[in-house]
Image (tube, helix red, strand yellow):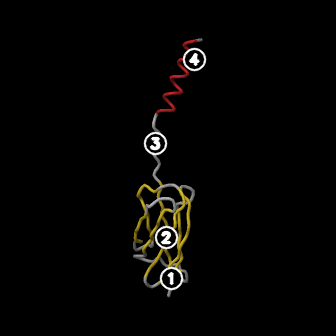
Amino acid sequence: MKYVIISLLVVVALVTLTPGKSRTYFIHGYVTNANTSDPIDSARVHGSCILSPRTFDVYTDINGYYEVLDSLTPGSWVVTASHPNYKSQTRTVNLPTQTLIIFSLDPR
């Protein structure tokens, strides 16, 4: 019985002290024209974490697609899509729950 208890304590200690896999969170999505649903090329997508000084800046490709592959901090992020020919749009998202963000921008 003594060896069983010691064995269990060793197993619990190993499981507790073993570092877990760190998770990488990312954001991705599309920026489109609100009137035509056409993709907007070279739109800027900027984000800032509400609880830390982390920020990111990316631009959409020809299909209006963007992705942020940096290791983002879990929590609330303010994300803005903008383009000189369109009105900007801002969303607040929560990581890791929400990672797909689709923006539909109105032309100026």
**Outermost residue, top direction?**
1
Q: Name the residue beneath numbered marker 1.
A: 87
| Residue 95 at x, y percent in the picture | 53, 57
The N terminus: image quadrant: top right
Residue neighbourhood size for the residue with mark 4, other residues' Cα within 10 Å, grouped as few (<14), some (14–19), many (≥20): few
Q: Name the residue beneath numbered marker 2.
A: 30
Amino acid type, callout 2: Tyr
Q: Nearer the viewer, mark 4 or mark 2?
A: 4
In front here: 23 or 100? 23
Amino acid type, callout 4: Ile
| Residue 90 at x, y percent in the picture | 53, 73
Q: Element type at marker 2?
A: strand
Compute the Cα span from label 4 to label 2: 55 Å
Q: Name the residue beneath numbered marker 4.
A: 5
Contact check, label 1 and label 2, Cβ < 8 Å: no
Amino acid type, callout 3: Lys
